[in-house]
Image (spheres, rainbow, N blue to C red):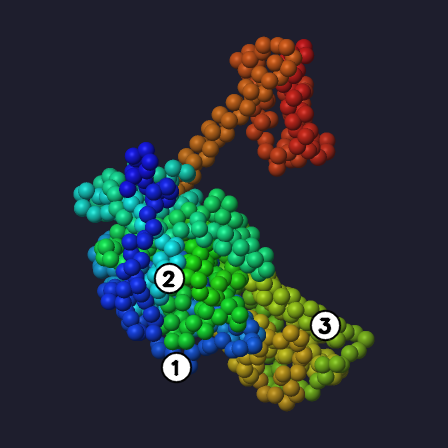
Amino acid sequence: MHCADGATCRNSEIADESVPLTAFSSLLLAPQIHLKLSLSGKTKPRKNPNSRAELLFVMPVETPILPVKGKKNILITSALPYVNNVPHLGNVVGSVLSADVFSRFSKLRNRPTLYICGTDEYGTATETKALETGQTPQQLCDEFHKKHKEVYDWFEIGFDYFGRTTTEKQTEIVQDIFLKLHKNGLLEERTTTQPYCEKHDGYLADRFVEGTCPKCSYDDARGDQCDKCGGLLDPFELIKPRCKVDGAQPVPRDTKHIFLKLNELQPSIEEWFEDAHKKYGWPANGTAITKSWLTKGLEGRSITRDLKWGVPIPLPGYEKKVIYVWFDACIGYPSITANYTDEWEKWWKNPEDVSLYQFMGKDNVPFHTVIFPGSEIGTGEKWTMLNHLSTTEYLNYENGKFSKSRGVGVFGNQVRDIGISPSVWRYYLLSNRPETADTQFEWQAFVLSNNSELLANFGNFVNRIVKFVNAKCDSTVPDFSASYTDDTFDFPAWIARVNTLLAEYVDELEKVHIRAGVRKLMEISTEGNALLQYRLDNANLVEHPERTNTVIGLALNLCHLLASLASPYMPSTSESICKQLNTSLAHIPDVWTPEVLKSGHKIGKAAYLFTRIDDKKVTEWKAQFGGSAESRAAEEAAKKKKQEEKEKKKAKKAKKAAEAAAAAAAAENGATVTAAETSPAEAGSVEKATEISPADVESAPKVAENGGKETPLRGPRTKDDFFKDLVIRLKKPTDQ
């Protein structure tokens, strides 16, 4: 296919001569072709040789969780992790761990809640990785599905079902959505120009092409996306493209593909987006990314590829192509649910009774807020669509990036060998969750969070009161009254403060403010320590037994409340508290009344929740996970080079600005002074001034008019002051 001027069209650049799939319409209606898909089993989709009917490593479900009419039913997904590598800490906290916190919280609020996740297994990345490791794609998927599950199990991630996308259910549901979009006229065939490797005689999917990013000059950008700047790319945009298989330079060659008409779906997507992000309070980054896509205008997007590993296209003539992962990955959520229960549509086609919460890193936003919703809308069916979006920025490692190849950072399969409990890891990652900006994983902060927060605050409170009751009260809750008060301590006011913090905790987690929620948890623990600090000692036990018994009763009941509030963040710690209190976990209440552990209740034995980490471990772990000396040196050299290039560009820009400003000032005064005629000292002053950003104005030194010497500022300067000074300095030579 060619454009009007005869040039070959490429990908989304085709507009005028796109060909609707009308040629296939009659075939779709012909029953003997079996293209129309029904999940009832009366007709069958094209079989996928890659899919499996049964999931590996997953136990069968006997009694599935289903929505309950009239209740707030919560459906939770976390971005499906890809199977080409082991997740690092940033991957863990960005989606699966954050979603786990909200899932546990929702269940403790007594709501029917289903948390679904699984491995995303189709696509180019799988073929690429399998090629590197000498495995078949299926072997690779089996290996990494198991590795991912083991990592998440260690982190105590409480999925209700952890599945995978290489299943018959995935094939059925993907093909069903595909055919409904086709029936509704939202798919079209286009002839595109794709990279072709003549050396191994095959078309190259986007990820099989590597080269230099045209936007940020990163040397290892892929043909679909640059991992450094996040820009979406076309393989032909890359500078010096190369085949990932053999390094040969690919050549353009025509091939036919099917495109989803996102441009026709844009009005409906925009209407849905405007309602959802305002009604449910989406985070700023998710809203901004979606708006950016919609503002630029959606274009038809290819949803097929020249690959073998994927869901077959249920149309004749496409037997050697598959549906692309950008289209089918999010469909993994309903397909994994379908493997969990045959009644999956009660979750996924029930928007009146189900609220959908989706967790992901910001790089996954467009697929969940544009492409998947567009596909759902395009089917004409009543899908449960995204309500609450929770996105994160990036978690970096010690002011750098996690890198498996360079050995930089901690990856999921390494964590257990460090010897620190999952609760400590979960607490630090969640209290450092990159919700509104990038955050850093730092070993010093990790150790400090354990020693100064978990151990000194939370652990100290629980251990102190349980040990006291073990030793002084025969492990028995004494007679106490929650309404007791005296002139030395206002117990009702203390209970009111706890309830205020409880309400704030619940409110933060209802809004999916995970990091703020864990802060409220620690504030409630601080109130517990304050209560114990109020004379919980042997003397008071003898001299003021009623007062002391009240302190004990309130403190033990607060421990029980903390067990519930800590459970979403540190489930094993919560279990330990309940064991020490000899009771079970309770739902998170709206209002706390300290009456669960009543007088006469026997508690268990005290046990340490946390142990101190030696500060010396910081140096040891930094060395262990900081990469090789060679890789660190190379990284520092690259940073230095990048900074030098940045400074050169900055200086060049400043020089041009100075020349332009000098010329403008000279012209204004009727002079012909050029930048070349300006003295070096004066030119330097101008360049230095133009390099100061408005944000630095208040703290920048002021260049005086007496020879360019610097004197301290005599008060805050504004942006206007800065530019007035610049004009004065530029005019001075002509004024003399």
Mark 2 residue element: helix
> Pointer 2: residues within 10 angstroms few (<14), some, or many (20+)?
many
Residue 147 at x, y percent in the picture:
33, 65
Gap between marks 2 and 1 measured at Cα: 32 Å
Closer to viewer: mark 2 or mark 1: 2
Residue 337 is left or right of residue 42, and the answer is right
* Quarter of the rendering containing residue 586: bottom right
The residue sitting at 59% across, 33% down in the picture is 693
Closer to viewer: mark 3 or mark 2: 2
Residue 688 is left or right of residue 720, and the answer is left
Residue that badge 1 annotates: 62
Front-lying residue, 190 or 437: 190
The residue sitting at 63% across, 89% down in the picture is 600
Mark 3 residue element: helix
Q: Quadrant of the N terminus?
A: top left
Residue 496 is marked as 3
Give the answer, above or below, for where 316 lies relative to 479. Answer: above
The residue sitting at 62% across, 34% down in the picture is 694
> Pointer 3: residues within 10 angstroms few (<14), some, or many (20+)?
some
* Tag 3–tag 1 contact (CB < 8 Å): no
Disc on the earlier residue, 3 or 1: 1
Closer to viewer: mark 3 or mark 1: 1
Give the answer, above or below, for where 31 lies relative to 679. Answer: below
Disc on the earlier residue, 2 or 1: 1
Residue 549 at x, y percent in the picture:
70, 82
Residue that badge 2 annotates: 180
Residue 279 at x, y percent in the picture:
59, 60
Amino acid carrying mark 2 in the image: Lys
* Quarter of the rendering containing residue 233: top left
Residue 393 is left or right of residue 27, and the answer is right
Amino acid carrying mark 1 in the image: Glu
